[in-house]
Amino acid sequence: MLGWWLGAGAIAALAVLVVLFNELIAARNQVRAAWSDIDVQLTRRHDLVPQLVAAVQGYASHERATLEAVTALRQQALQAIALADKSRIEAALAQQVNRLLALQESYPDLKASANFLKLQHDLVEVEDHLQYARRFYNGAVRALNNRIETFPSLIVARLARFIPAEFYRHGDEQQAPD
């Protein structure tokens, strides 16, 4: 009778470990999928930036410093690997793109350009989608990190060497205290 109870207990413990492991895998995959959504939006932004630079250059060529800053930041963003670097560079790029968009106030011909207005609309749309994607990603990171840090899943997480995911901080956002 004792052997039966021990066997049933071992099977139950194994089932719990399997369920916890699968939940950790699902949470990690959710983070990866959410990052993919961010990456898609960043790629869309990166594809629109040269078009915006070309459109502005045609009307405001003496805004050379802003145009060069946008181009340089786009290149840095494409090369960034670490999440902290990427988020910092992307925030700076977004700020410079907004400066380019603001030039329309100084250049009436630019403001009337259908191409510029279309690019402006597309960039606003990308920024909106990017904001939603960042929120979704950070929610997925929070869920994964909670699983990694709470009992009983932390036991499985440590055994399987899960590591907490990094939040996407937009620009200079402060990290919350531990």
Image (cartoon, grey):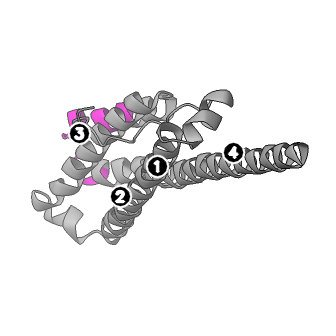
Which residue carries the number 1 mark?
42
Q: Nearer the viewer, mark 1 or mark 3?
A: 3
Please tell me which of labels 2 and 1 falls first in the chain. 1
Q: Magenta stretch containing residue 62, yes or no?
A: yes
Kindly identify the amino acid type of the residue bearing the numbered disc 2.
Gln
Q: Secondary structure at mark 4?
A: helix
Q: Residue at x 16, y 55 (%)?
A: 102
Q: Which mark is residue 173?
A: 3
Q: Nearer the viewer, mark 4 or mark 2?
A: 4
Please tell me which of labels 1 and 3 falls first in the chain. 1
Kindly identify the amino acid type of the residue bearing the numbered disc 3.
Glu
Report if the CB atoms under discs 3 and 2 are less than 8 Å apart: no
What predominant SS class does the magenta segment belong to?
helix
Which residue carries the number 4 mark?
21
Give the farthest residue toward the left: 106
Kindly identify the amino acid type of the residue bearing the numbered disc 1.
Leu
41 up-or-down from 176: above or below: below
Q: Residue at x 89, y 43 (%)?
A: 3
Magenta stretch in the rendered image: 58-73
Which residue carries the number 2 mark?
131
